[in-house]
Image (cartoon, helix red, strand yellow):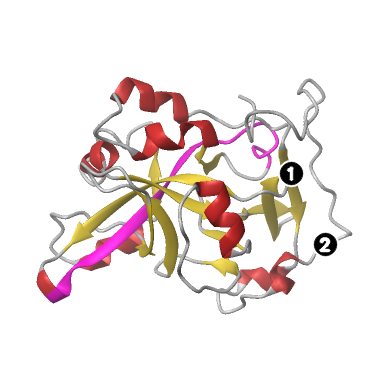
Amino acid sequence: MCGRFALTSNAAIISRNFSTDISHSFKARFNIAPSQKVLVIRVRPHRTEREAVFLKWGLIPSWAREPTIGARLVNARAETAAIKPSFKTSFRQQRCLIPADGFYEWGNNAGIKQAYYIQLRSREPFGFGGLWETWGQGRERIETCTILTCHANSLMQPIHQRMPVVIQPNRFDSWLHSDQTRMTEISKDLHTLSAANTVIRPVSEYVNDVRHDDTRCQTPCEHIKQPNPPRDNPPFAASQKFLFNR
């Protein structure tokens, strides 16, 4: 699953990496949590241009009677999102990218809950595969989103069995343009990411408190052993085409 993440890059870097104008003024976020507003890159159906908006994290299906359901739908399993009533319409028509610099996951370390921060070896921002939806009418309209998850790679598995889907930059257009992409093409974006270019490091328990949102959330825990990437994966190359190899 993905229950916390960080977006610390500035607007210029995000604009460059996602090929859209980030005109919003926003501060670095080190501990983004469900129910909060998150930056979303999307293309509305039957349009061509990308737009950057802030949506509430926790998807509320358009048919829901109450918005409280969103608290339970912060993640969607990639394997079943296309057929689940809560996600199938969004999966076909309203996919999005959710920029992040890294995400947190909690594992068990000798019976103690330990937080880990996961990011690209290049430290570049990337885009979670997400879905968005509109609930309500008139002034009660709420736009929300969810993050897709898939099976964890070998480096993540000792910590958690799931991890977020991350869309390759060369697949951004296919992912965002729902009216131009066949569903068979979308399946190419829903695989487990390579462990070779994934970096995991234990961080301070400071991040456990959702009220904390500063650099101390990523303070390394030097006394906790860091997972090592599998030896059979190729080394990272700064010039490689993809953020992650499959």
Q: Please, what secondary structure does the residue beneath circle 1 have?
A: loop
Query: Label 1 vs label 2: CA separation?
Result: 21 Å
Point out residue 80 in the picture as x, y percentages from the top left corner. 33, 33
Q: In this picture, is 57 found above or below 108?
A: below
Residue lying at 82% horizontally and 62% vertically, measured from the top left: 221
Residue lying at 39% horizontally and 56% vertically, measured from the top left: 74
Label 1, residues with CA under 10 Å away: few <14, some 14-19, many ≥20: few
Label 2, residues with CA under 10 Å away: few <14, some 14-19, many ≥20: some
Q: Residue furthest right?
A: 223
Residue 10 falls in which quadrant of the image?
A: bottom right
Residue 243 falls in which quadrant of the image?
A: top right
Which residue is the site of mark 1? 122
Which residue is the site of mark 2? 221
Q: Please, what secondary structure does the residue beneath circle 2 have?
A: loop
Type of residue at label 2? Cys
Quadrant, the C terminus: top right
Q: Which residues are magenta?
A: 139-158
Residue lying at 50% horizontally and 74% vertically, measured from the top left: 25
